[in-house]
Image (tube, coloured by chain):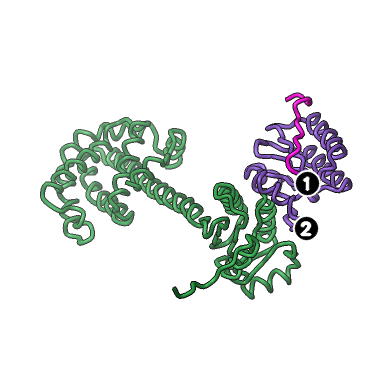
Chain colours: A purple, B green
Amino acid sequence: MSTDHIAVLKVREALLVTVPSDPEDATVAALQEQVLRAMERHAGKGLVLDLSGVETVDSYFARTITETAQMVGLMGGRTVLAGMRPSVAMTTVQLGLLFPNALTALDVDRALDLLATPEPDGRRP
Amino acid sequence: MMRRDVSQQTTEVTAEEWVRRKEFVGFTEQDAQWLRELRPAADAFVGDVVEELYRRFLACEETNAFFPDEAAVARVKALQTAYFRGLTQGEYGEAYLADRLKIGRVHQRIGLSPRWYMGAYALYAQLVTPRVLAAYPADSVKGQRTLVALLKLMNLDQELAVTTYLAAREAVISQQAREILEIATPVVQIWDGVVAAPLIGSLDTARTQQFMERLLERVVETNSSVALVDITGVPTIDTVTAQHLIETVTAVRLLGAQVVLTGVRPVIAQTLVHLGVDLSDIITRSSLAAGLHVALDILKLQVTGKRPA
């Protein structure tokens, strides 16, 4: 997957990014760049990362996503990880990789609902 | 049917193991030779021995029960004759091993307890000893050596039988252990968007792993926002178990759902506090019912009584 193919879509008030199945380091870095630029351009309320296609995660991915969530937070948005697969969740927990600044949702739909609610209602891993 | 599956799975004794066992009891090629030479005499007295053996079996209530009618007796007598003639066949390699293991499995399958099986060998020894010695009237040394060779071989046969019993028993035990692992972690949907998992028994690493897997899969399958994990059936909790629970809760959160830990009994609450386990991040309740209330709150649902029409 080439870095050019990260698409940042604006849906309602939020930004939506579908993360490729086996994200390489360069892809994840590019994702951060593009997301932050889009945040600036659209003044989005938040970021939804659709992880439903992701099959593997590593510590670089976890760290970059955590940092991105923190940066999005500084720019006034919330980050929601949507649709993580059970196997990925298990690996993540077993490797001790946490996403402390991100909210989670079962799917993109619920992630958008979550961002639409004014006060953040928990679900921090 | 299940028994058959179990006995077919067992690979009790390998060819190398069989060689080592023969070495251990000192069963040599010379012994095989003595037994080959005994064959004509053995064929002459096998009929007597088998008749006498079955007179004893049929006289005993427990063993009698295995022979429902005359036809059955005739059939097993023929098998017994074949077994005894096998002892003097002269070749004791892998084919012999396979045959003896098969015999062991058959006895295990029909549920004949090892004590009767072993007892039968004692009877055999008593019946065979005078007859073997009598076969060599002129050479008592050869008679004794032949007898010792025969007893060694019968001893090896007994070992194989015991091994078969144990292997079959162990296969049953491990299958049951697997089944317990399977049934002990059901995850059921109890409301739209709510699954419940009653944990029963102690939580070791293997079970937690499996439980976590199942719970996460069910949460996604049923698209549930809340998972109630009920630990009423967990007898005790230690730091490792608590850690496992925290991992499970964290994994469920990563999916975008929430865990409510229910069934925290007084003794469990005491233990957790004394151990210094921090569960303040997790919603906990003392009963599953209280947990369901929390779940409905999270889903912003309200249960109201029906008005009379």
Under circle 2, the secondary element is loop
Q: Which residue is mark 1?
A: A79
Task: Please state the chain letter of the residue tagged with numbered disc 1 in the rendered image.
Answer: A
Kind of residue sitting beneath label 2: Glu
| Residue drawn where x is 68% and y is 61% of the image | B242
Q: Quadrant of the C terminus of chain B?
A: bottom left
The residue shown at (80%, 48%) is: A78
Q: Looking at the image, which residue sits at the far left?
A: B70
Q: Is residue B30 magenta?
A: no
**In this rendering, do the residues under marks 2 and 1 share a single chain?**
yes
Q: Does residue B67 appear anywhere in the picture?
A: yes
The earlier-in-sequence mark between 2 and 1 is: 1
Q: Is residue B67 left or right of residue A101?
A: left
Which percent across, then down, holds residue B103? 30, 42
Image quadrant where residue B266 sits: bottom right
Task: Please tell me whether residue A7 belongs to the stretch shown in magenta.
Answer: yes
Say which residue appears at 79% left-offset and 31% top-offset.
Answer: A25
Q: Nearer the viewer, mark 2 or mark 1?
A: 2
Residues drawn in magenta: A1-12
Q: What label sits on residue A119 in the rendered view?
A: 2
Circles 2 and 1 in contact, beta carbons < 8 Å: no
Residue B7 horizontal/vertical position (percent): 37, 44
Q: Chain of mark 2?
A: A
How many other residues sit within 10 Å of disc 1, few (<14), some (14-19) or many (≥20)?
many
Foreground of the two, B244 or A83: A83
Left or right placement of residue B146 versus residue A56 in this view: left
Residue B280, image x, y percentages: 74, 65
